[in-house]
Structure formats: structure tokens, C-alpha cells
Image (cartoon, rainbow, N blue to C red):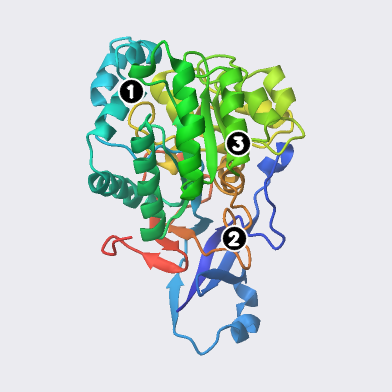
């Protein structure tokens, strides 16, 4: 079935010549067609343009059944791409939320057996099927908030059996949901309790047990390491990334969340597609990123929730870098996958312009997932992942109204998804 959306107040991120990413001053430029139409066919974008040009394009519409949607007063956006989440997890950690309110730091909670190790314990006790059911509820949640592509990390297993369990659940989500999924192996998320004082042995398990199974079952697109104070050193990170590269796993980095860890420089050195968090970044990190293919990916929800310094988005953009934004959806430091809220935090906390924030959650976040050829903008031949807003006065209203649900209609792979339809 074809879908024709008419009378669109503003068609956002429409491109005749698609870009893989935008950087520096270009991040403040947003392609917008007013009084527009969008034609979708067989799951892909077929055509778009101004309503005044639609009559001459009616020949594009075949004898197929066509559904028309009147979007008068509304905007159409490409679906959000969320390039950093931990959405496959068991249970929740609201008790740690109370600990944070009482003044305990992230590191103090971790030393008491909380944090990542707490999630690992819960995950170990949860069956594969129950883990899938819990995770799919979150997938449904983010779909109806406008997300059409998501990267999901392992990292709450911390042993071979449970890491593989997580990655198999991610694969099952990928096969059973209309959302686009990319999978990341993050066995190096923390050192489990049983390896305290023997961390080299755990790294050996990651390299010689986990990675070969991950690769043989094709369970991950990327490999990630938490290269930061109290977690994995630069030297340990290099060991793990090199092992992953031998099996074709593309590097990513958790880095510079807690300190100036060298994670950014290590990611660039090994050709990481993205380096993520970056709350502690300065001139050396920006210099290392300039002119590279590595996308700085900022997680303002995590910094907000933990009370960390905000990453220096403004300095990065002014230095000519592109940036992506992600939700970091996880039970401990960012229990939300609301990318509209992430946009608002980008504007309010990181001092990004609305246009910059939109580019950071669409084209640049698609790049950070390795899917910019097919997702992240509205272009002929790209996958038809879009959403229609409620009536709005402008596209700037979308991040401005930070607490309002403004997503009205979700279309994924050319099909309308609604509350009655189980994604």
C-alpha cells in the first residue's frame, strides 16, 4: 500500500542529495519544505515536495491501494535514531535513585555492589524469554515516542553465558520488531566481583571466550569498552578493541564520562564509529576528533540524571565537529528513551540551537549507528521511517514544549503503527 501525506505544514530534513553527517556551522542548517507532501511506497520514500507540485507528480501513483493522510497544521520528521542504549535489562534500580538523592556518587554506589553489578545480578536471575518480554515493552515505548532506529548494548551479563543471552535477546528484537536495530557487544562494561584482583583473567575471557562466540553467531555489529576511571584503562581498551577488530567488530567507546580518561583518543586511534558520553572533554579531545570519521555522541539525559558536568557541545560545534545525541536508556543513569526530551536537554543544557538538536538526533545519530545511507533523513529511496506531529506552530516548538507528547502518527518501514497494533 502507498501512503500519501498531504498538506504538511513543514517537512523536516528533506534532502534531494542525502548527506552522511553534518558538522560545525552546517549543523545549524535544516532542510524544510513548507506546505508539502510525502509519498511512501513499499516501505520506502518515493517522492516529496511542495503541494503546488503534486498534481504534476500524480503519475508516480500507480494502481496500488493508496491511503491519504491530511497533515494540515502538522510537521513530519524522520524518525529518531538513538545510537546509544542499554534497553535490554532486567528489573529496575530505583533504590539507587534514592541513594543519589541522599548524596552518594555513581562510584560509591558501584563500590557497594550497585550500578552495573546490580543489573548483572538481576539479569543472571532472569530467563531469556522474560528478558525479551521486559525489553519489548521498552521498545514499544520508544517507538511511540518517535524512535525508528536504536542501538542496543550488552554489558549487564559480565560472563560468557549472560552476555550471549543478552545479545540473543537483541537479535530476537531485531527479528520481531519493525524498529531498526544495531547490536553492540559490551562485555567490557565493568569487572565482575568474582574477578576483583584478577582483572586480566576477565579480559582474557572477553577476548578468548566471548568475542569468538559473538562473531561466530553474528550477534553484534560493534564492540564497545567502558574506558574510564574505575573501569578499563587505555591499555586494556586497546587489547579488547584489537581482538574485536580481528573478528570484524567495529569499535565504539564509552569514555570521558567520569574523568579525562584517554577514551576519546583511543577511540580515534582505532577508528571508532563513535565515542560516547564525553562529559569530561576539552581542547585535546576536540583536537583528536577533528578531521576524523569518529562521531562524538553526547548523552545529556545521563549527565542530567547523575548530576555530572554537561558535555561541551557548544565548543565541539564551534570547533567544526558534528555531534550526535542519544538517550543512554538504562536502569541506572538514564531510565528514559525519550529522544524528544533528549533534544530539549540538548537545547536547554547544552545550548544547542533547535536545528542543531534535530540534526543530532536524525542524520548524525544515524551516522553514529552506521545507517545514514538508509535512515536519518527524508530522501528518495531511504526507508520510510517518519512520524507526524500534532498541530504545532513551528518546528522549534517541538524541543521547546519539553514535557508535551507531540508525536501523533508513527510510520515504520512504510507501515502505520498505532496503539492498537502491536509493533
Q: CA distance from mark 3 to mark 1?
A: 25 Å
Give the mark nearest the N terminus, 2 or 1: 1
Query: Badge 1, how many Cα within 10 Å: few under 14, some, many 20+?
Result: many
Q: Are marks 3 and 1 in contact (CB under 8 Å)?
A: no
Locate residue 148 relative to residue 105 in the image: left or right: right
Give the mark nearest the N terminus, 2 or 3: 3
Say which residue label 3 marks: 274
Q: CA distance from mark 2 to mark 3?
A: 23 Å
Query: Is residue 56 something that shows in the picture?
Result: yes
Is 135 or 197 nearer to us in this picture?
Answer: 197
Up the image or down, 341 lies above or below 142; here it is: above
- Percent of width and height locating residue 280: 57, 18
Q: Secondary structure at mark 2?
A: loop
Q: Which quadrant is home to the C terminus? A: bottom left
Please state which of the two labelled residues, at mark 2 or mark 1, is closer to the viewer: 1
Say which residue label 2 marks: 378
- Percent of width and height locating residue 29: 68, 46
Is 268 or 84 nearer to us in this picture?
Answer: 268
Up the image or down, 340 lies above or below 105; here it is: below
- Percent of width and height locating residue 16: 70, 63
Say which residue label 1 marks: 117
Up the image or down, 371 lies above or below 350; here it is: below
Amino acid at each position: 500500500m502507498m501512503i500519501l501525506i498531504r498538506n504538511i505544514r513543514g517537512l523536516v530534513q528533506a534532502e534531494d542529495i542525502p548527506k552522511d553527517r553534518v558538522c560545525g556551522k552546517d549543523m545549524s542548517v535544516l532542510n524544510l519544505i513548507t506546505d508539502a507532501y510525502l509519498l511512501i511506497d513499499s516501505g520506502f520514500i518515493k517522492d516529496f515536495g511542495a503541494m503546488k507540485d503534486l498534481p504534476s507528480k500524480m503519475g508516480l501513483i500507480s494502481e496500488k491501494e493508496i491511503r491519504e493522510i491530511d497533515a494540515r497544521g502538522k510537521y513530519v520528521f524522520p524518525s529518531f535514531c538513538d545510537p546509544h542504549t542499554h534497553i535490554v535489562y532486567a528489573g529496575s534500580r530505583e533504590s539507587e535513585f534514592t541513594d543519589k538523592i541522599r548524596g552518594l556518587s555513581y562510584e560509591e554506589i558501584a563500590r557497594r555492589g550497585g550500578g552495573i553489578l546490580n543489573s548483572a545480578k538481576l539479569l543472571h536471575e532472569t530467563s531469556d524469554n522474560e528478558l525479551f518480554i521486559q525489553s519489548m515493552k521498552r521498545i514499544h515505548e520508544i517507538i511511540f515516542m518517535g524512535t525508528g532506529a536504536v542501538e542496543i548494548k550488552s554489558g549487564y551479563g559480565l560472563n560468557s553465558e549472560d552476555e550471549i543471552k543478552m545479545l540473543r535477546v537483541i537479535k530476537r528484537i531485531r527479528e520481531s520488531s519493525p524498529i531498526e536495530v544495531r547490536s553492540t557487544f559490551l562485555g567490557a562494561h565493568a569487572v565482575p566481583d568474582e574477578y576483583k584482583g584478577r582483572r586480566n583473567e576477565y579480559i582474557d575471557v572477553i577476548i578468548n571466550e566471548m568475542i569468538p562466540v559473538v562473531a561466530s553467531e553474528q550477534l553484534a555489529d560493534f564492540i564497545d569498552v567502558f574506558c574510564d576511571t574505575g573501569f578499563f584503562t587505555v591499555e586494556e581498551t586497546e587489547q579488547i578493541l584489537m581482538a574485536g577488530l580481528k573478528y570484524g567488530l567495529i569499535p565504539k567507546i564509552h569514555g570521558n564520562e567520569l574523568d579525562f580518561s584517554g577514551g576519546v583518543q583511543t577511540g580515534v586511534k582505532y577508528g571508532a564509529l563513535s565515542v560516547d558520553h564525553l562529559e569530561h572533554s576539552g581542547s585535546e579531545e576536540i583536537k583528536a576528533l577533528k578531521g576524523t570519521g569518529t562521531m562524538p555522541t553526547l548523552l545529556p539525559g545521563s549527565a542530567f540524571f547523575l548530576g555530572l558536568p554537561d558535555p561541551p557541545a557548544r565548543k565541539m560545534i564551534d570547533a567544526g565537529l558534528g555531534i550526535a545525541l542519544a538517550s543512554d536508556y538504562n536502569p541506572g543513569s538514564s531510565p528514559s528513551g525519550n529522544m524528544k526530551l533528549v533534544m530539549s536537554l540538548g537545547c536547554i543544557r547544552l545550548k544547542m540551537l533547535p536545528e542543531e538538536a534535530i540534526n543530532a538526533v536524525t542524520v548524525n545519530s544515524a551516522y553514529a549507528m552506521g545507517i545514514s545511507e538508509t535512515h536519518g533523513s527524508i530522501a528518495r529511496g531511504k526507508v520510510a521511517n517518519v512520524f507526524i506531529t500534532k498541530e504545532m506552530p513551528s518546528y522549534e516548538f517541538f524541543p521547546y514544549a519539553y514535557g508535551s507528547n507531540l508525536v501523533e502518527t508513527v510510520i515504520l518501514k512504510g507501515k502505520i503503527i498505532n496503539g492498537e497494533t502491536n509493533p
